[in-house]
DNA sequence: GCCGTTTTCGGCCCGACTGTTTTCAGTCG
C-alpha cells in the first residue's frame, strides 16, 4: 500500500487532535505530532521511500517513537496506538479538521450536535440549525466560508503559474507611491515546486493606507482578515493572498520572518535563544536588556546572528544554517549563468510520433535562443514510435532530419550565431533498451534518453531500466529521471543512490527538467546526486518557444539542490561543452 | 514526543487575529 506524504501528515494530525480531545499527554507531545506532520508535508522526498531505504531518521522531528509507529503503519497498514487513541471519536471529527478555522475543539462540538459530514454541515448552517443549537452566528459564518474555500482548493499551484499570478499583484502594488519595497514571501520566494497561497511583504511608512489599497485590488472576491498592518484576501480565482506591511527600519526582519521556511526559522530562533536573543518579525531582541534591534535588510538581520544570509531557495533547515554560521554557503548557480537549452521539441514533420511533437519550427527555436542570449540550443524531438514504424523507416527519418538541421545551421559557423545541436529524446523501453537503433543514434550530436511508459514499475524494474540506459555508450543525458508529474503522478521508485553512482562513473548527465509540472530531477535528489559527483543539465523540454522561458524554474530546482555553476553543464561555454559531449 | 557546542533531563519559536475573552481559548502562519 502506498501512502502519500499528504495522507501521512493527515494521519499524524488526526492523532494530535485525538490527544487534544482526550487530554492525552502534554502540549509538547501534541505538538510533536504536528511538527512531524509539517515536516512530512513539506518534505520533497517521499517518506515511504525513505522508510524503505531505512532513512526515516534523516527527517528531523521523527524520533524513535514516531519512526516505530511509521514502521508499523507501512508494514501493517495501521497503527495500534493510533487506533486506540482515536477510539470513540466520531470519524466525522477528522474530516471537519480539514475546514480552515476549525480545530479539534470545534470539530468535536460540531460532531456532538449531530453533524454527519461536510455536506450536512453546510445544510445545518444554511438552515440556521447550527446557530439555534448554540453556535454564535459569527462562528457559523466563518465555518461556512472555510467550507467554501475547501471546495475551491483542489491542488497547490505549480510554481510557474503562481509566479504569473504573483506578477500581476506585484505590478499593482508597485503602482502605489507609498510602497517603498515589495517582495514575494514563503514558498513562492523559496521557489518550491508548488505553492499553496501567495504572500507578499511591503515596506512603507503608511501601513494602514497600504492595507486599504491592497484590499481594493481588482479581482478580490473576499477580504478574510484585515489588521493594522496585514490583510488576507481571496481572489475570484480562489487563490488566497496575504499581505504584510512593515516600517522600512524593520523591514529586514519582516522579510526574513515570512520567507521561512518554518523549519528554518524555528532552528534559527532556537539558536538565537542560546545566544540570548529572541527573534521576531520586528527584529532581534536582547533578552537580558529587553532591547529590540531593528534591521532594515535581511543581511543585517543574519549578520546580528553572526552568519551569512542563506539564499531563500535553501532555507529549509537542511544544513544551510550551519553553513552560514561557518561562512561557507555554496555559490549557487544563477539564471544568468545559463548559456543554452538542449531539450526543445520542434514541429519537424514526423509520421507516427511516439509522443507529442512541438508546435514551432526549428528556425523559430533558433531565433528564440538567440533572443535569450544563448550560445547553443539542442533540438531534441521524439523519434517515430518504434512499434508503429519499421527500423529502416526510423533510420531514414533521422537521416532526413539530420540533413535538414545541417543545412539550417550553416550560418552558425560565424561567431555570433547560436550553435545548433542535433539531438533526439528517445524512449528507454521496458527492458532498458532504446527505441532507436545504435546505427541511427550514431548520426546524432547527442542523445537524450528517458522513460515515457510503465512509470509504475517496481523499484527493481525501474532501477534496471535506468541502469541499462546509463550503460549505453550512445546515451549522454537522462531526461526527467523520476518521471513525476506534480499533482498527478508520484515519482517512480528506484535505487537512486546506485543510479547516481553509476551516472557519475560513466559521465552521464542527469537532466533537471524545467517543465512546470515536472521540475524533475527533484531538488532533494539533486542534492543527493551532487554528493556522488553527478553533473546536471537544466533543460526546458519546451514544446513551444514560449516555454523556453521556463528555464528560471529549472534553475530554482538546481539552487534548491545546492548546485553550483560548475555542476551544471549548460553554464559552460561552447568549447567545454563540445569537449564533454565530443561534438 | 523530540532533542543536544549547557546531550539522557528539562526544556521546547513567536506573535497575530477572532470571538465575547474583561485576561483568555482556539486557530493560524
Image (cartoon, coloured by chain):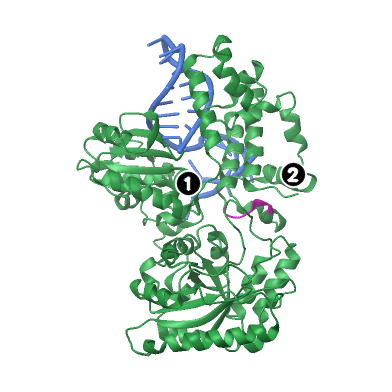
Residue picked out by circle 2: A73
**Residue drawn 45% across the image and 77% down it:** A362
- Is disc 1 in the same subunit as disc 2? yes
**SS class of the residue under badge 1?**
helix
Q: Where is residue A291 in the image (x, y as percent from the top left)?
A: 29, 36
Residue A534 figure quarter: bottom right
Q: What chain is colored blue?
A: B
Residue picked out by circle 1: A267
Colour chain A is painted in: green
Q: Give the range drawn in magenta.
A: A44-48
Q: Main secondary structure of the magenta part?
A: loop
From the viewer's perspective, tell me whether residue A56 is left or right of residue A309.
right
Q: Position of residue A478 (x, y in %)?
A: 59, 73
**SS class of the residue under badge 2?**
helix
Between A442 and A571, the one lying in front of the other is: A442
**What chain letter is assigned to the residue under label 1?**
A
Q: Residues within 10 Å of mark 2 (few under 14, many from 20)?
A: some
Query: Does A496 sit above or below residue A401?
Result: above
Query: Does A16 sit above or below residue A573?
Result: above
Amino acid at each position: 500500500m502506498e501512502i502519500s506524504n499528504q495522507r501521512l501528515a493527515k494521519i499524524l494530525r488526526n492523532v494530535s487532535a485525538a490527544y487534544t480531545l482526550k487530554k492525552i499527554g502534554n502540549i509538547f507531545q501534541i505538538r510533536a505530532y504536528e511538527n512531524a506532520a509539517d515536516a512530512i508535508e513539506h518534505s520533497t522526498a517521499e517518506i515511504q521511500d525513505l522508510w524503505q531505504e531505512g532513512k526515516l531518521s534523516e527527517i528531523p522531528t521523527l524520533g524513535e517513537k514516531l519512526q516505530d509507529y511509521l514502521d508499523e503503519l507501512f508494514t501493517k497498514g495501521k497503527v495500534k496506538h493510533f487506533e486506540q487513541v482515536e477510539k470513540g471519536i466520531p470519524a466525522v471529527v477528522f474530516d471537519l479538521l480539514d475546514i480552515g478555522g476549525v480545530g479539534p475543539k470545534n470539530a468535536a462540538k460540531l460532531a456532538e450536535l449531530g453533524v454527519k459530514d461536510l455536506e450536512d454541515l453546510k445544510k445545518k448552517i444554511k438552515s440556521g440549525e447550527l446557530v439555534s443549537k448554540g453556535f454564535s452566528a459569527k462562528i457559523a459564518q466563518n465555518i461556512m466560508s472555510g467550507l467554501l474555500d475547501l471546495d475551491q482548493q483542489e491542488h497547490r499551484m505549480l510554481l510557474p503559474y503562481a509566479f504569473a499570478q504573483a506578477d500581476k499583484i506585484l505590478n499593482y502594488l508597485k503602482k502605489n507611491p507609498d510602497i517603498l519595497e515589495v517582495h514575494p514571501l514563503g514558498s513562492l520566494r523559496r521557489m518550491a515546486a508548488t505553492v499553496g497561497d501567495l504572500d507578499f511583504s511591503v515596506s512603507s511608512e503608511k501601513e494602514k493606507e497600504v492595507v486599504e489599497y491592497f484590499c481594493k485590488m481588482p479581482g478580490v472576491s473576499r477580504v478574510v482578515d484585515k489588521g493594522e498592518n496585514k490583510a488576507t484576501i481571496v481572489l475570484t480565482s480562489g487563490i488566497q493572498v496575504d499581505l504584510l506591511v512593515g516600517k522600512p527600519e524593520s523591514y529586514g526582519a519582516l522579510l526574513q520572518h515570512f520567507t521561512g521556511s518554518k523549519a528554518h526559522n524555528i532552528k534559527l530562533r532556537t539558536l538565537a535563544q542560546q545566544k540570548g536573543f529572541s527573534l521576531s518579525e520586528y527584529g532581534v531582541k536582547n533578552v537580558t536588556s529587553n532591547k529590540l534591534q531593528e534591521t532594515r535588510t535581511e543581511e543585517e538581520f543574519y549578520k546580528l546572528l553572526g552568519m551569512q544570509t542563506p539564499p531563500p531557495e535553501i532555507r529549509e533547515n537542511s544544513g544551510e544554517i550551519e553553513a552560514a554560521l561557518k561562512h561557507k554557503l555554496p555559490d549557487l548557480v544563477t539564471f544568468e549563468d545559463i548559456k543554452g537549452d538542449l531539450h526543445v521539441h520542434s514541429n519537424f514533420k514526423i509520421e507516427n510520433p511516439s509522443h507529442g511533437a512541438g508546435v514551432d519550427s526549428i528556425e523559430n527555436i533558433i531565433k528564440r535562443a538567440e533572443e535569450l542570449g544563448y550560445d547553443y540550443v539542442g533540438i531534441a524531438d521524439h523519434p517515430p514510435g518504434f512499434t508503429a514504424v519499421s527500423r529502416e523507416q526510423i533510420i531514414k527519418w533521422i537521416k532526413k532530419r539530420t540533413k535538414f538541421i545541417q543545412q539550417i545551421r550553416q550560418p552558425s559557423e560565424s561567431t555570433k550565431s547560436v550553435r545548433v545541436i542535433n539531438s533526439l529524446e528517445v524512449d528507454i523501453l521496458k527492458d532498458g533498451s532504446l527505441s532507436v537503433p545504435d546505427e541511427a543514434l550514431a548520426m546524432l550530436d547527442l542523445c537524450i534518453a528517458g522513460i515515457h511508459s510503465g512509470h509504475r514499475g517496481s523499484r527493481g524494474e525501474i532501477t534496471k531500466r535506468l541502469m541499462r540506459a546509463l550503460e549505453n555508450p550512445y546515451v549522454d543525458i537522462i531526461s526527467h529521471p523520476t518521471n513525476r508529474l506534480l499533482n498527478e503522478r508520484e515519482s517512480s521508485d528506484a535505487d537512486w543512490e546506485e543510479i547516481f553512482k553509476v551516472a557519475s562513473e560513466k559521465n552521464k548527465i542527469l537532466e533537471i527538467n524545467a517543465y512546470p509540472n515536472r521540475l524533475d530531477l527533484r531538488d532533494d535528489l539533486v542534492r543527493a546526486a551532487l554528493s556522488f559527483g553527478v553533473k546536471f543539465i537544466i533543460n526546458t523540454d519546451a514544446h513551444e518557444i514560449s516555454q523556453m522561458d521556463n528555464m528560471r524554474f529549472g534553475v530554482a530546482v538546481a539552487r534548491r539542490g545546492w548546485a553550483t555553476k560548475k555542476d551544471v553543464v549548460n553554464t559552460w561555454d561552447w568549447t567545454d561543452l563540445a569537449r564533454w559531449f565530443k561534438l
